[in-house]
Image (cartoon, grey):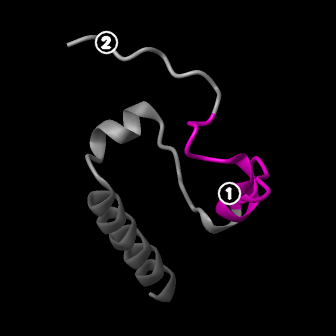
Amino acid sequence: MKKAEKDSDELRSEYAREDFGSMTRGKYAERMREASNVVVLDPDIAEAFPNAEVVNQTLRRLLELARSSTQA
């Protein structure tokens, strides 16, 4: 079995550039930035929280504690 040759930057013969309409690079980038709420944890914090579920549980408990301490 031979290795596939590297594809050039050309479309295959069965495709025509016109089939794809106009293309704009980064067309949805701003929308994704606005809709996203990704938070990057520092490495030492990430070690303590193995997944998103644990992070959310911990933050909920912390929020409950903060609310209860201000009401007392």
The residue tagged 2 is 3
Q: Position of residue 49 (x, y in %)?
A: 29, 47
Q: Residues within 10 Å of mark 2 (few under 14, many from 20)?
A: few
From this view, report whether residue 71 is shown above or below residue 53.
below
8 left or right of 51 in image: right
Seen from the viewer's position, the closer of residues 59 and 10 is 10
The C terminus lies in which quarter of the figure? bottom left
Quadrant for residue 34, please give it: bottom right
The residue tagged 1 is 19
Q: Position of residue 18 (x, y in %)?
A: 74, 54
The N terminus lies in which quarter of the figure? top left
23 left or right of 53 in image: right
Q: Is residue 19 magenta?
A: yes
Quadrant for residue 44, please give it: top left
Q: Residues within 10 Å of mark 1 (few under 14, many from 20)?
A: few
Quadrant for residue 5, please give it: top left
Q: Looking at this view, name the residue that lies furthest to the top.
A: 2
Q: Looking at this view, name the residue that lies furthest to the bottom.
A: 71
From this view, report whether residue 72 is shown above or below residue 47.
below
Q: Is residue 40 magenta?
A: no
Q: Which residues are magenta?
A: 11-33
From this view, report whether residue 55 is shown above or below residue 48.
below
Disc ID at residue 31: none
